[in-house]
Amino acid sequence: MFEVVIGLEIHTQLNTKTKIFCSCATSFGEKPNTNVCPVCLGLPGALPVLNKEAVKKSIAFGTAINAIVNKRSIFNRKNYFYPDLPKAYQISQFEIPIVEKGEVFINLEDGTLKRIGVTRAHLEEDAGKNVHEANFSGVDLNRAGTPLLEIVSEPDLRSSTEAVLYLKKIHAILRYLNISDANMQEGSFRCDANVSIRPKGETKLYPRVEIKNLNSFRYIQKAIDYEVERQSEAWTEGAYDKEVVQETRLFNVETLQTRSMRSKEDSAEYRYFPDPDLLPVVVDDEMMQECVKIPELPDEKKSRYIKDFGIKAYDAEVITNSVELAKYFEEMLTYGASAKNSVSWLSVELLGRLEGGIENSPVKAQKLAALVKRIEDGTISGKAAKDILDFLMKNDEEVDAVIEKLGLKQVNDDGAIIAIIDKILEANADKATELKNGKDKLFGFFVGQVIKESKGAANPAKVNELLKAKLGI
Ligand code: ADP
Ligand code: MG
Ligand code: ZN
């Protein structure tokens, strides 16, 4: 009876070498306060200079989501006081963002595509970080001034599942464009989820709560689910007006609950005004032309895989969701493995054995392709290939050498297989007669026996064929 309404704000760190308004490095994990200068420390008199790369990467993103890229946008000061913000304002974009009115498509479980509007994507600087030690607190300003792209969606998402699909799509686009490493553990891709409910059929928006700084897909899903539950309960119990107010909430990863942090500030409270230290951002035609050239994106890649290789939509989705997986898959093809087998050996067998990401796989694309090719040319059985893959996960050796070493070469030689067939038929003469007399179920038994006798080496297709010939069936 309720409809869930969700809009997401994603903060993603652009992977420029230097910060957005100074030449300090953006590297992660350095000693506190080593990547700082008068500009990002907010010292009086220091002046910001815009990093062109950050603008270029934003334009690429705008192009990828089919948005309007504003040829003229402006920077504002967003005023608030917090210890990790030395200037007491954040430089951000407010009334004219660099990117607005875009869209992405998510693939729902029933196979349909759903359009999710992207209201805007604007450039801003990140704040520093408060660090709390056992007996003191400090502020690390290494992160202050790193470039962020804040991507704001329309309230078009209707479930936590849709929210996660949307996030994964944006995540994939950022990685395909190589404009952000979007590493969630390091905080370079984090999300605020705005959540409200309303009676089904109504179109007006009800008060929303904003859950801050979620940095894993799982937590985002859990936080939204909890919040939907809380709001629905309040409604049902007649306590909605009292308990669901516009506010900012925090998600507790231990209890999987959200709790109130502060009432939500109105934009008026930030006293936004254009930053007098920065000129408007003007994108000239030359820069625009350079930046709209973007690589193939996940959706296009997916359609191409389905069309050109006959891959199932689900598999195509899994592989194209990650730029590294897609690259690995395409590399397997260049080494001559077939698309269909590459898909299953990559997405089922290899991924099933991997602990980390594909980029750290001990078995590289060339080797997995070599393994697949040995199945395809009949040298080994699929089952043997699984054992070989297990071995390769722990040992850096060549596929052919491992086949020899483990003695897993498939027997394709007719004479050798017929000899085994004869032996098995003789040993099971009664059953052989029954089979000849029409007890078809026994055929599988004989195939199994022959393969077992060959210690798994006999090619099953060959066994089938030769056994039939032998029995005259
Ligand atoms: P702010 O910057 O103050 O957080 P915005 O008005 O830009 O706010 O909206 C932020 C996000 O909240 C957007 O993603 C928007 O889609 C979403 N949103 C706005 N109203 C609602 C609502 N009633 N329910 C759910 N999400 C909402
Ligand atoms: Mg917000
Ligand atoms: Zn600096």
Image (cartoon, grey):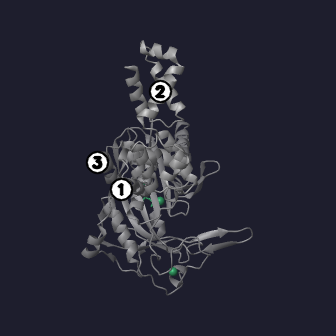
The quadrant in which the N terminus is found is top left
Residue ID at (33%, 60%): 64
Cα–Cα gap, marks 3 and 2: 42 Å
Q: Amino acid at mark 3?
A: Asp
From the viewer's perspective, tell me whether residue 141 is left or right of residue 470: right
Q: Which mark is residue 308?
A: 3
Which marked residue is nearer to the observer: mark 2 or mark 1?
Answer: 2
Residue 384, position as x, y percentages in the image: 51, 42
Q: Which residue is mark 1?
A: 334
Q: Nearer the viewer, residue 411 or 365?
A: 411
User: Image height check: is 231 above or below 69?
Assistant: above
Q: Residue furthest right?
A: 135
Q: Is residue 334 above or below residue 240?
A: below
Q: Residue shown at 50%/39% (left/top)?
A: 383
| Figure quadrant of residue 148 | bottom left
Type of amino acid at the residue the image marks with label 1:
Thr
Q: Secondary structure at mark 1?
A: helix
Direction from residue 473 to residue 82 in the image, left or right? right
Give the mark nearest the N terminus, 3 or 2: 3
Q: Is residue 331 visible?
A: yes
Rendered-image quadrant of the C terminus = top left
> Which label sits in the foreground, 3 or 2?
2
Which residue position holds label 2?
421
Q: Nearer the viewer, residue 247 or 215?
A: 215
Query: 294 or 304, which lies in front?
Result: 304
